[in-house]
Structures are given as C-alpha cells and as structure tokens.
Image: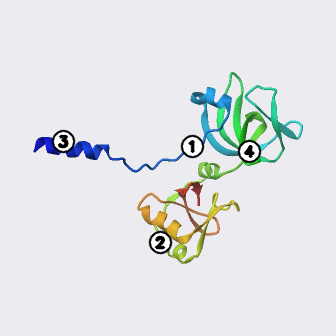
Amino acid sequence: MMKKTVLILLVLLALPLPAHADVIVEPENAFYQRHRGEMEYEQRGYYVNGEDGWLPVVEEPGSDKVLWTVQNGEVLRIMFLYADSWDFWGVAERRTNDRWESGWVPMDRMVLKYDAQSFEEDHSFTSFNGTFERVSEAQTVTLWTYPGSGEVAAEWDTESVMGWLGNMTENIQAYDDPDGREWVYIPYLGGIRNVW
C-alpha cells in the first residue's frame, strides 16, 4: 500500500501546474544582452527634452552611432534603465517596417510623463465596498490610465471586466475623485496593467 501511495504522489508531482506569470519583453539589443543583470526594469513613458530640439537615439550608452532621432515633446517608452559610471541611460523601442528596433537615450534629457504610478504616489486609496451594478449594465467598459487622465488605455467587453471583478474578493483599491466619482483600480487585465 505504501509503494502505491508514493507512486501516486510522484505522478501527481510530475503533472504540469498552470502558470500565471507576466512576460517581460526584453529588447533585441546587443548592449542589453551583455549587461542584462545590470538593468533596472522601468516600462514608463518619458518626454524627449534634447538640447537642440531633438535627441539622438544611439546604439549603446556613450556611443556616437545614431540609430534615429526623436523631436522634443515626443514620448518614448523606456523599457529598462542602465547606470554607467556617471550617467543613467534608458533603452527605448520603436516599430518600423514591421520590425522592432531599440536604442539608448541619456535619461538626463528625458522628462517623466505623469502616469498611473505617479498618480499612485500622489494619492491615497480606500478599499472598495460598493457593487458593480452600473458596470454590469454597460455594453463596454472604458479603462483609463488613471482617474482624470483623459487617456483611454483600452475598451473591454463588460463580461471580461465583470469576470475579473468577480474573481477579486478582497483588497480592491478605490479612489473618489473631486467630482464624487468612484474609480476602481485594476492591476492586470488580459495584458493591460495598472488601469482604472
């Protein structure tokens, strides 16, 4: 009997378990690959603020090889940060001709775009104790980057959003804006992060 029980346990342990992990997309960049362990994950938007009204995106930190240029005021998504002896650099990507290319920019020429993380740092939240009756009556649900941003992150069908909300049984964060509207924070929904 003992051998049979051990065998059953071994078979059960060998079965694959469902995985629930996010994938962090890494840039296809030789410098990044060589220094992967020295990178800090960022994934935030920054406005370009070059000295001459534009900023060169270079092959690697400190390089003179310009891959492309970006005009001041444009937003670059900085994926990872790297610190060399004196400076911070950010790796950004852009899509051209159905392929992605990445390059580096000096972070002292970038200005952080106010985002959900900034909003979280500036505000306090409460626990949501209400119901989602109004949400369930809508045909689609608009997901915003943060309350009052005016920036739509996505629009989802109500059933998917209600499924996520139904699975959340505790610790749902909420925010009451100055106009008396209650916002609910959704940390992750189908590949979209940090929306309201």
**Residues at marks 3 and 4, CA–CA distance in whole angstroms:** 54 Å
- Residue 184 is drawn in which quadrant? bottom right
Q: Horizontal and vertical percent for residue 54?
A: 86, 40
Mark 1 vs mark 3: give the one in front: 3
- The label shown at residue 94 is 4
Labelled pair 4, 1 in contact (Cβ < 8 Å): no
CB-based contact (under 8 Å), mark 3 and mark 2? no
Amino acid at circle 2: Thr
- Give the number of the mark in front: 1 or 2: 1
The residue closer to the viewer here, 154 or 116, is 154
Cα–Cα gap, marks 3 and 2 = 47 Å
Residue at image x 69%, y 59%?
149
User: Can you identify the residue that label 2 sits on?
Assistant: 131
Residue 29 x %, y %: 68, 33
The residue type indicated by label 4 comes to Arg
3 vs 4, front mark: 3
Residue 76 in view (yes/no): no
Residue position for label 3: 6
Which label was assigned to residue 24? 1
Query: Which badge, 4 or 1, comes first in the chain's sequence?
Result: 1
Q: Which residue is at the front of the view, 47 or 101? A: 101
- Upstream in sequence: badge 4 or badge 2: 4
Q: Could you tell me how far apart the alpha carbons at marks 4 and 1 are, in whole angstroms?
A: 17 Å
- Circle 1: element type: loop
**Residue 154 visible in the picture:** yes
Q: CA distance from mark 1 to mark 3?
A: 38 Å
